[in-house]
Amino acid sequence: MLDLQNIRSQFPILEREINGKPLIYLDNAATSQKPILVLNALQNYYTDLNANVHRGIHSLSQMATIAMEEARQKIQKFINAKHEYEINFTRGTTESINSVAYAIGNSKILKPGDEILVSYLEHHSNIVPWQMLCERTGAQLKVIPMDENGILQLDFLDKELNEKTKMVAFNQVSNALGVINPVDEIIANVRKNSSALILVDGAQSIPHMKVDVQQMDCDFFVFSGHKMYAPTGVGILYGKAEILQQLQPFHGGGEMIATCSFQKTTYADLPFKFEAGTPNIAGNIALGAAVDFIENIGHDAIAQHEHQLLVYAQNNLLKIDGLKVYAEKANRTGVVSFNLEGVGIASDVGMILDKMGIAVRTGHHCTQPIMEFFNIAGTVRASFAVYNTLEEIDQLVEGVKKAQRMLS
């Protein structure tokens, strides 16, 4: 059992009120709150270490460099990457995916008629960069379909994977529905039937479950810090070293060069090849602190607690007449996405809940294809983190009942 009182005491924002009510924060799939350990790491950098990294011989620069590289090593171990130089700091999942897409385009890997596969469950950030790459190269985008339960139809891979397939990109967990995709099965199928590169979007899985990129055998794994208790504007692009070494970088500038002249530039070794410019040093160090926070609690303890929240929330919400939970029968984590029959706009429910101090997300969640599949404009999404409680779920259920009475 988790010591929830102790965990919650580490998040100062949970002590505040919204509209005169205690804050109940259930929008963790959008961004999580930050514990004192992370906040202190940010403050300590700016008060004690503030200097640029990798470039100075003076003491502050050296100490800042050590602190940031220690964070890289923590993240390497956190996802079990083989080498620390396979961990590349970015601004988040979106930039990580774009970096891969542009690197592939710059490296002339794609030609007209080649194919990129994505799944129906993707966030826009794992759709649009590939569409843009297809427009630049003449490649074609294909979509792994899903059924009414939000479960991907993987027989599509048996029919569609071929020598023209150059990239397969999909999320480990859907941000809109919370569906956990069978990553191992998908990757095994791709390896058997093609030589395609594989990118896994871990933005929604990394806060909830243990990730082992070597066991997974993906070529790229991307995630954001701000969904796992770290600051905004920081993220990770993991890539197998042998693949990153072959790719042309996305950004050009300082730090990512070995030599530069007006005649020719050569690129630095990994990871600096993909880290042009001054990084978000404070954010990267604080991401290391977020790793410490998660590991201090333990992945198994977090997963068990959040599963209890999910089951409790779904069971009690489904007792409300006319409430539909999307992907109800799928294997899920962290998210209950629902609508009320007869209530046309999900945001109306969200506004009523906000008056009660309950923060949820409403709308299409940057997954318009999913919403079109279900023929809806959006959903109400309650998403959970380690600091949420069963009592907060009770308040959510009562709030939804109130919204139903007011809006029906």
Image (tube, grey):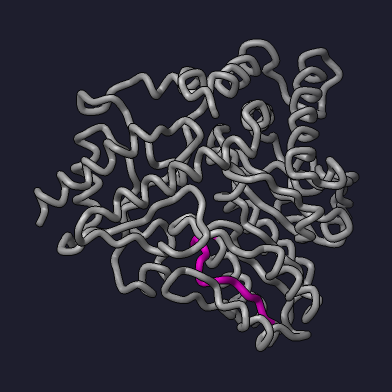
Reply above or below: 346 against 51: below
**Residue drawn 19% across and 51% down?**
348
Q: Which residues are magenta?
A: 115-125
Q: Nearer the viewer, residue 290 or 139?
A: 290
Res. 263 visible in picture = no
Is 117 colored magenta in this rendering? yes
Q: Nearer the viewer, residue 317 or 196?
A: 317
Q: Nearer the viewer, residue 341 or 112?
A: 341
Instruction: Give residue 250's position: percent from left, percent from top.
Output: 71, 56
Q: Is residue 295 left or right of residue 337?
A: right
**Residue drawn 82% across and 19% down?**
62
Q: Is residue 77 left or right of residue 161?
A: right
- Number of marks in the image? 0
Q: Quadrant of residue 229?
A: top right
Reply above or below: 189 against 357: below
State the quadrant of the N terminus. Answer: top right
Instruction: Give residue 342's position: percent from left, percent from top.
Output: 15, 63
Reply above or below: 198 against 277: below
Q: Quadrant of residue 138?
A: bottom right
Instruction: Give residue 186's position: percent from left, percent from top.
Output: 68, 70
State the quadrant of the C terminus. Answer: bottom left
Q: Is residue 144 left or right of residue 111?
A: left
Q: Nearer the viewer, residue 285 or 253?
A: 285
Reply above or below: 223 against 161: above
Is 252 colored magenta in this rendering? no
Instruction: Give residue 58's position: percent from left, percent from top.
Output: 83, 15
**Residue drawn 82% across and 44% down?**
271
**Residue drawn 73% across and 62% down?**
103
